[in-house]
Image (cartoon, grey):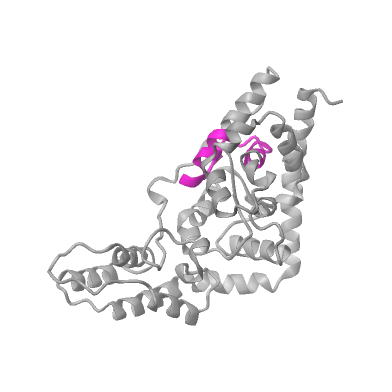
Amino acid sequence: MDIVLSGIRPTGNLHLGNYFGALRNFTKMQYENNCYFFIADYHSLTTHPTPENLQGNVKQVLVEYLACGLDPEAATIYVQSDLPETAELYLFLNMNAYKGELERVTTFKEKAKSQPNNINAGLLTYPTLMAADILIHRSHKVPVGKDQEQHLEMTRTFANRFNRLYKVEYFPEPVAYNFGDDLVKIPGLDGSGKMGKSEGEGNAVFLADEPNVIRKKVMRAVTDTGPVEKNAKKSDPVQNLFTLMQAVSTPDTVDYFNDKFNSCEIRYGDMKKQLSEDIIKFTDPIREKIKQLSADDDYIKKVMEIGKEKARASGSKTIHEVRQIIGFR
């Protein structure tokens, strides 16, 4: 059974892109592997060093993880800062991470451009913290997106470097977990790119959004003036709407609006109304579960405590062994 690790930053609510991108696959994966899911509150400080409500954000992400079907009995679900062993391994890995290789990381260069007044050491050493998250449990597989592939490659570099320097075969070489055809890329409502928090509130449909909010967002979604000839190619914004509809609507509904588009009879307003109601219907059970869990502080504390104990059992063993390998007694 492989050890699989995945994390998410507590910087906002989860959206449909998160759900179809990974969360729904996690619910199956947790019963087939030894899974660790963590809330990356340390990581969030690299770009949000003075969060207004870190504790509230952590709770919200945990609640939404659980509402989407993660099972604290089957998987280990924990908060990154509840595992101080991660910070210690991060320190050890930094001793053998080099300035030049860290400065060449694509995401560091991009973040340095976007936040020139906050190019902090944590931003530079983000790959070593990510490596510590993965290696603290000696993970075999990591679900990652395209933007994280370089970080995973660096994790393999750090693992191999540790093994080579100390002449051991301790850390495994983690690889990307491939969801294959089950991975669905959900576009945003702004007409281009993927659904995401960083693109603005109006671009994403969040799992906790109320029906009236969903209707307003979808009705404002970017389209075009409509097809002028039969069987025309769909523009990117219109294709985005159809991709969303394929994810949440019935095949008959998708076929109906496809036929209307191909015959130049489509009314985007009607399509958006239908899409809104289908999204509402799809997210309703998740939204109700979020409300239920948000009101049950005792259960959330229990889940966090269970996750903390399970994560520390794994992490403390790794740190004990790493300290011995390095030479600490």
Q: Position of residue 257 (x, y in %)?
A: 24, 72
Q: Position of residue 107 (x, y in %)?
A: 53, 45
Q: Nearer the viewer, residue 32 or 125?
A: 125
Q: Position of residue 268 (x, y in %)?
A: 28, 77
Q: Residue at point 52% right, 61% down?
A: 198
Left or right: 311 with respect to 248? Answer: right
Residue 313 seen in this snapshot = no
Q: Nearer the viewer, residue 110 or 69?
A: 110
* Quadrant including the C terminus: top right
Q: Residue at point 73% right, 46% down?
A: 310
Q: Position of residue 287 (x, y in %)?
A: 55, 72
Left or right: 41 with respect to 30? Answer: right
* Position above or below: 182 against 325: below
Q: Is residue 150 magenta?
A: yes
Q: Which residues are magenta?
A: 129-155
Q: How many marks?
A: 0
Q: In the orientation shown, which residue stands out farthest toward the bottom?
A: 212
Q: Is residue 124 magenta?
A: no
Left or right: 28 with respect to 261? Answer: right
* Quadrant including the N terminus: top right
* Position above or below: 125 against 264: above
Give residue 228's quadrant in the image: bottom left
Give residue 56's quadrant in the image: bottom right
